[in-house]
Image: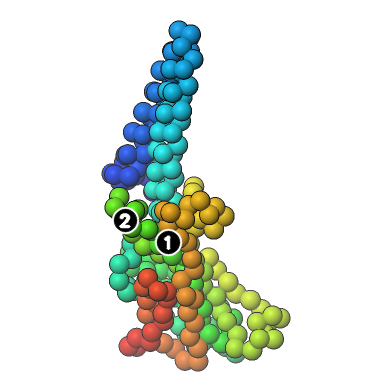
Amino acid sequence: MTSIGALASVPLFIAGVVLGLGGIVIVLLGFVRLLRRRPFGFLIRLLAGLALALAGALAVAIVLGIQGYQALTQEVVAAHITVTPSGAQRFDAQLRFPDGRTARFVLAGDEIYVDAHILKWTPAANVIGLHTAYELDRIAGRYRAIGQERDATRTVFALGTDRPVNLFALRQGHAWLAPLFDAEYGSATFLPVDAPANLELRVSTSGLLIRKGER
């Protein structure tokens, strides 16, 4: 989880906190006007303060929501994957991420499957430094036969992380966020696993791709 110290170095987070605090101060000043029996001044300050506080809360929510996402401006390697068959329609998959983390999964099926969340920010959001970003969502084993996909053992594991604000889910549920960003699954990718292999999982603004690497 991202520490407060790390967030404090993010310009948008700082702006959100300043806006939020400024909004609270303006609302408090509005109540002072109310005590002095100046309802119009109170109303103006209340509305202005709430607007600033909401803008600040939105900025902070965006920063919290994009923690764990990786900036994406071109095709990049999201993970190196080593696959090793271990039996009939069974294989091990070991992932090594660019930051050095590793993860191992035991999967059932004929193919390895991975998908991702991709956040595409609008040009207006690009101005404040928000750009297309991705987060790997899940890894699974995939059967070639539809009947087995329905009835055979399913192995699906999460690759994403929990966060206080889920921007992906928020965008899918609230159309009013469309002027800021779009949320979509990157094109899911899968590849047969019939022999030991080293693979590269690549991601671009158009989706995911698995390529065979050198062993």
Numbered disc 1: secondary structure: strand
Please, which residue is most extreme toward the front here? 40
Residue 61 image point, x, y percent: 44, 45
Local crowd at mark 1 within 10 Å, few (<14), some, or many (≥20)? Answer: many
Specify which label sits upstream in the sequence, 1 or 2. Answer: 1
In the displayed structure, 17 sits above or below 184; it is: above
Please, which residue is most extreme toward the bottom here? 194
In the image shown, does 3 or 22 lie closer to the viewer? 22
Q: Pointer 2: what residue?
A: 126
Q: In the drawing, what numbered circle is on residue 119?
A: 1
Is residue 122 visible in this depiction of the protein? Answer: yes
Residue 58 image point, x, y percent: 43, 43
In the displayed structure, 213 sits above or below 20; it is: below
Which residue shows up at 42% across the image and 74% down it? 207
Q: CA distance from mark 1 to mark 2?
A: 12 Å
Local crowd at mark 2 within 10 Å, few (<14), some, or many (≥20)? Answer: some
Which residue shows up at 39% across the image and 48% down it? 63
In the image shown, does 130 or 3 lie closer to the viewer? 130
In the image shown, does 86 or 141 lie closer to the viewer? 141
Amino acid at pointer 2: Asn
Is residue 169 visible in this depiction of the protein? Answer: no
Residue 147 location, quadrant = bottom right
Amino acid at pointer 1: Leu
Residue 106 image point, x, y percent: 54, 76
Image quarter in which the C terminus is found = bottom left
